[in-house]
Image (cartoon, helix red, strand yellow):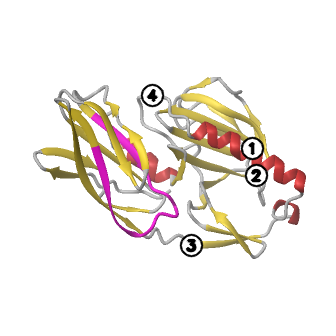
Amino acid sequence: MKKIIPIILLLIIGLNAINISSQKVKNANTVLVSFQKKDISNPKLTFNKQHINFFKSNKKEDTYYALVPISYYEKVAKHKIIISYIKDGKKIFKGVPLEIIDGKYKSEVINVPKGKVSLSQKDKLRTKKEYSNAIKIYNTINKELYFDEKFIYPLATKITSDFGKKRVYNGIFKSYHSGTDFKAAVGTPIKASNNGIVVISGNRFYAGNSIVIDHGQGIYSCYFHLSKMNYKTGDFVKKGEIVGLSGSTGRVTGPHLHFSFRVHGMQVDPLQLINLLNNYTVY
């Protein structure tokens, strides 16, 4: 397993301390911003037209935090995060510099049955519907946080395909790898990364048998290509419980677990996000 060393920085913006997990971040990674301020209301964050609400910490007094997912396609450049809140009837704005750097993701060539790349009209309609339904779920931000412990990996095996690789299917660039693939023979037990509510449980064209868990506040973990699903939509699952068994359903070349995360609807590097969340104590 890769070990990712967290870098937690403290930026001083005027007279107020604003914590940001890193001043430089790769595309498709996540940063965490927090600050402490008394007697304020309506704290918000804006990054490249994306508006994100802050949540109030249950562990640190007068402290607010927000996760900022960076798009895989975000332009490599120096940017600025804008934080705003209302204090004594006045709206206060503060800017935090953030530099997006190239993740330098590699490419991989994958050969799959033609019907999984060049889709029939029926399959196009199916995938479009499945995508639309999933995006509605991923863009739903529940204010409640369902976890209060560190996240775990769904299983402890070799990583066979890293997040972010450009996926070239049968010689045609189609997408990038939106998760991390773990080696897993058919029937391997898959653990829930943390507490949450199952919001997707079913078979989908690309992902096969899929379990998606809402951990609250816009954080979703995904477990794809399963041979068996142990939970249905609406079930509450606890950290470490077996959500299902690994398999080779959906668009795959062999059995494995595809493990991924969404934050505020955006695909992000799951291992980097876990590392970030596990080294932050504001929750």
Q: Is residue 168 magenta?
A: no
- Choose between 195 and 44: the one closer to the eye: 44
Which of labels 3 and 2 is toward the front?
Answer: 2
- Location of mark 3 (residue): 106
- Report which residue position mark 1 lands on: 130
Query: Relative to 183, is 132 above or below?
Result: above
The answer for how far apart the CA atoms under marks 1 and 2 are is: 9 Å
Is disc 3 surrounded by few (<14), some (14 to 19) or many (20+) residues within 10 Å? few
Q: CB atoms at circles 1 and 3 under 8 Å apart?
A: no
Of helix, strand and loop, which mostly describes the magenta segment?
Answer: strand
Q: Amino acid at mark 1?
A: Glu
- Identity of the amino acid at label 3? Lys
Of callouts 1 and 2, the N-terminal one: 1
Tell me the SS state at disc 4.
loop
Query: With 279 as the anchor, is 232 left or right in this view?
Result: right
* Residues at marks 4 and 2, CA–CA distance in whole angstroms: 30 Å
Local secondary structure at mark 2: loop
Mark 1 or 2, closer to the camera: 1
> Measured from the top left, where is residue 58 in percent x and y?
31, 25
Residue 259 position within the rendered picture, expressed as x and y whole percent measured from the top left: 61, 48
Residue on which the image places disc 4:
143
Residue 184 % position (x, y) = 69, 50
Please, what is the three-letter code of the amino acid marked with disc 2? Tyr
Amino acid type for the residue under numbered disc 4: Lys
- Bounds of the magenta segment: 64-83
Q: Secondary structure at mark 3?
A: loop
Q: Which residue is mark 2?
A: 206
- First of labels 1, 4 by sequence position: 1
